[in-house]
Image (cartoon, helix red, strand yellow):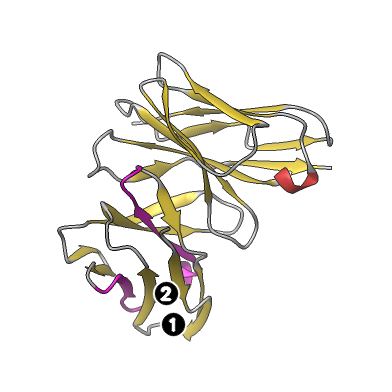
Amino acid sequence: KQEVTQIPAALSVPEGENLVLNCSFTDSAIYNLQWFRQDPGKGLTSLLLIQSSQREQTSGRLNASLDKSSGRSTLYIAASQPGDSATYLCAVRDSNYQLIWGAGTKLIIKP
Amino acid sequence: DAGVTQSPTHLIKTRGQHVTLRCSPISGHKSVSWYQQVLGQGPQFIFQYYEKEERGRGNFPDRFSARQFPNYSSELNVNALLLGDSALYLCASSSPTALGGYTFGSGTRLTVV
């Protein structure tokens, strides 16, 4: 059974710092991995989608990597801003077309 | 292009009642999935429909049911509501291939009192 873990559960850093969020999964048989952002009480906004054959994807200040063999993905945020404060979730898509989710990392960027 | 739309945005129901949540996918997407998110946790898979057929079901009781219409919109029904059904219900649409990512709606916040 696929399990997804996100570490740390919460992170608070000063504005301007670069930071890394981690996501690990137990079964490497995934189709893709997707990173999402969720603001309090809101829905999910897709940030980056990495196919199982890819190593990384970039969008603006965000870079996501995928190492399927080790069951790991990282989300790198450069030059963090207060507006980046949110909960970040990763999800893997399995062979049954389901998304299996981590519990998220709550990120606070201090001005 | 319109994104995934869900209605209503908020709902308050009493224990034992029935609720229907609605979702319209992105134009061209034929697959709709439903997720339940309890506060402080990641979403949990409830159902996926593709071309009006159920393609997957998560570990939820039979009180939960869903269907997909010819225009690919979907309804999630929950009968005999319990306090524990209070959650954010999220709908996602995706392309039918394994390569497609998911796009989520803003969710329906259900409170059972």
| Image quadrant in which the N terminus of chain B is located | top left
In the image, what residue type sits under mark 1? Answer: Glu
Residue sitting at the far top = B70
Task: Please tell me how many numbered marks the rendered image carries.
Answer: 2
**Which quadrant of the structure image shows residue A75?**
bottom left
Q: CA distance from mark 1 to mark 2?
A: 5 Å
Residue for point 28% across, 55% down: A30
Which residue is the site of mark 1? A15
Q: Is residue A98 visible?
A: yes
Q: Residues within 10 Å of mark 1 (few under 14, many from 20)?
A: some
Tell if the residue under mark 1 belongs to the same chain as the one under mark 2: yes
Please name the residue that numbered disc 2 is placed on: A81
Give the class, few, some or many, for how many residues have Cα within 10 Å of label 2's Cα (few <14, many ≥20). some
Residue at (72, 29) in percent of width and height:
B79
Q: Is residue A33 magenta?
A: no
- The kind of residue tagged 2 is Gln
Most foreground residue, B21 or A59:
B21
In this view, A44 is above or below A84: above
Q: List x then y, in percent, for residue B87.
A: 66, 47
Q: Is residue A77 magenta?
A: yes
Q: Give the camera-side residue of A83 and B44.
A: B44
**Where are the magenta residues, as a range?**
A70-96
Quadrant including the C terminus of chain B? top right
